[in-house]
Amino acid sequence: MNLWVALDWGTTNFRAYLMRGNDVVDKITTQEGMKFIDQQNFENTLIKNIKAWHDNFDFNLIIASGMVGAKQGWIEVPYLNCPCNIQNLNYETINILDNVTVSILSGIAQLEPADVMRGEETQIAGFLLDNENFNGSICLPGTHNKWVSLNRHEIKKFTTFLTGELYEITKKHSILKHSLNSNELNDNIVKISAEQIINDPTLITNKLFEIRAENLINNSDDLTNNSKLAGYLLGIELSGSKSYWEGKDLIIIGSSNLNKYYQLILKEKSNSIRLFNSNEMVLKGLSLFKKSLNL
C-alpha cells in the first residue's frame, strides 16, 4: 500500500501526516512541540498521537524533520555543513512499536559566519522537488527568518534574522507594549515604515521609540503603532539581507500572512518573486528525502 508517515515536529507544533505515496490520507496536529514536552517523553508523545493509525493501517516508516532532531529534541542528529547538497542530509533512526522505524533528519550548519537551520531545509527541498534547476534566493519568514542562496540542490550560504521573535518580545516586554494593543496591520504603513529603515538602517532604535512618543503626544492608534513596529523590523532585516533579494529571482516560503508583506515591499526591488506555502513544502520535502535517502 506504500503507506508511511511524514512528521514535522518543531518548537511549537507536532504535525503528522499519514501518506500514501505523495498523497495525504490523514493528519494530526497538536501543540506538543519541543518546548512543551520533556526530552524523555518524545517517544511516548509520538506513540500516543499515531496509535490509531498504527492500529488500523499498515506502515513501518516515519520520516521526521524539525527540532525533534535538535540537542534539546528526541535525539541530536549532527548538522550537515554548508555549502552542501541538500539531498545528502544526515539522519538517525529509532525503532518504536516493534516494527516502525523513525528516521530523523539533520539540519544544516554554516561555520563562517556561524549559522544553523533545522526544519527549513525540508521546506527548501520541497520547493526543489518541482524546481530542481532553480538558481537564486529563498526567503523563509517565521520566528527566525532565513535567507538562503541556492544553485540547484546546493545551498551556497544562508543567514538568519531574529525578526519574528523581536516583534513578539517588543510587543510583550518593552516600553512599547503600552502602545501596541493590536495584532492588525495596515499594509501601506508597513511598507512605508520598512522602506524608511531600508533607506537608513541607522534609524532603527530611534524610530522604534518614536512609536511610543507619537502615542503619548499625538495619541496615535494601536493599528498604526503595530504596523510601524512590523515595518521597522522588516526594514532592518531587508537592509541586512539586500544581497539576497536585490535584483534576484526570489522564492518566499512561509504562511500567506507573512509572505505577502515581503512581496509587498520587494516586488519592485527583486527580479521576480514567487510565493509558496510552508506546510505544503514540508510534505514535498519529506517526500523528496524519502526518495533521495532511499528510506
Image (cartoon, rainbow, N blue to C red):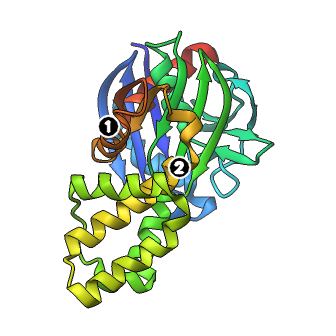
Residue at point 60%, 24% (across, down): 150
From the viewer's perspective, tell me whether residue 221 is left or right of residue 210: left
Residue placed most toward the observer, 147 or 107: 147
Q: Is residue 273 visible?
A: yes
Mark 2 crowd level (few <14, some 14–19, many ≥20, 10 Å Cα)? some
Mark drawn on residue 239: 2
Mark drawn on residue 27: 1
Mark drawn on residue 270: none
- As shown in the figure, which amino acid type bears the numbered disc 1? Lys
Mark 1 crowd level (few <14, some 14–19, many ≥20, 10 Å Cα)? some
The image quarter in which residue 58 lies: top left
Residue 127 x, y percent position in the rendering: 45, 22
- As shown in the figure, which amino acid type bears the numbered disc 2? Ser
The image quarter in which residue 234 lies: bottom left
Q: Is residue 10 visible?
A: no
Mark 1 falls on what kind of element?
Answer: strand
Residue pushed farthest front?
199
Disc number lying in front (1 or 2): 2
Residue 236 x, y percent position in the rendering: 50, 56
Going from N to C along the chain, the mark reached first, 1 or 2, is 1
Q: Is residue 2 above or below residue 32?
A: above
